[in-house]
Amino acid sequence: MDLYERAEKIKNFLAEKISYTPQAAVVLGSGLGSFAEEIEADFEIPYSDIEGFPVSTVPGHKGRLIFGKTGGKNIVAMQGRFHFYEGCSAQDISLPVRVFQLLGIKNYIVTNAAGAVNFSYKPGDLMIINDHIGLFCPSVLTGENDERFGTRFPSMSHAYSRSLIEIAHKAAQNTKTDVQEGVYCYCKGPMFETPAEILFLRAVGADAAGMSTVPEVVTAVHAGMNVLGISCITNMAAGILDQPLTHAEVMETGKAVEKKFSAYMKEIISLI
Ligand code: HPA
């Protein structure tokens, strides 16, 4: 079965369960899954109960799709995502986005945990992504192009929607949330970066480093969706502080900001 057929089958299965087209798909990153509690769910399903859907293996990623209402809007949330470092294929990583595309969803909101490359950031900050660097990792669009999904050579000049970025700033004002705006660099993972790599990333213009998001965003842009990305800065990147990085630290900061993050996300969704 090709990716289109796989995505279509899942789309048909999900479309039978809901009576609306969600206004946004929201992907919840490491430690940020508790936003799901803000959703009045109509329909929830573990990935493992969706035939043909990949299953996430990262601790802190629940692996559940939730359809419901928050901020006065119908949305679908993904609690847990897929990464190349788990051994997932490009097809697996792009599949959820393709399902959303076939469901007719126009807005794709990604969240993630990231390390601060920019010295002026601190753990607990939220960063609106205004661009990304994905050069160091394989493209999710490698292989034959399916024109039903999008064009062979998509532009990435406006990958992150300027109007959604403005909405994210407005939501920050309304909820009195301090936000940063900057460039996210996609790193291979699952190892954290070395101090020398972070020095390099700073020199080329990155503000934050993470191990996800870019493959999905590239897929969503290829699909013609409007993309918004929010990073939760969970730690200073390697070499800034004299201590090794751990996934536990990432999860702890996620937990510490979950209230602020959830209120902020809800406001963003209400303004879309
Ligand atoms: N590097 C890469 N990915 C991350 C980090 C980091 O420092 N923190 C959370 N995700």
Image (cartoon, grey):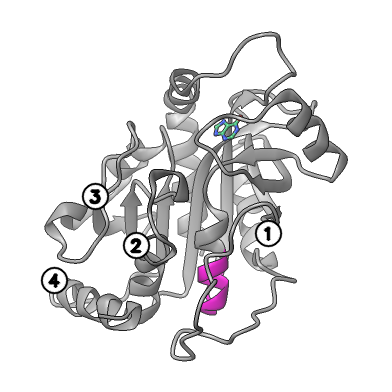
How many marks the image carries: the answer is: 4
User: Is label 4 in contact with label 1 (beta carbons under 8 Å)?
Assistant: no
Q: Which residue is mark 2?
A: 75
Q: Is residue 240 above or below residue 218?
A: above
Can you identify the residue that label 4 sits on? 17
Type of amino acid under label 3 = Arg
> Magenta residues, as a range?
218-226
For residue 95, above or below residue 43: below
What residue would you read off at disc 3? Answer: 64
Left or right of 251, for residue 150: right
Q: Residues within 10 Å of mark 1 (few under 14, many from 20)?
A: few
Secondary element type, mark 2: strand
The answer to whether any part of residue 207 appears in the image is yes
Which mark, by number, is residue 166?
1
Verify CB contact (< 8 Å) between mark 3 and mark 4: no
Q: Residue shown at 68%/52% (left/top)?
A: 136
Give the mark nearest the N terminus, 2 or 1: 2
Up-down: is 58 above or below 194? below
Outermost residue, bottom side? 147
Q: Amino acid at mark 2?
A: Ile
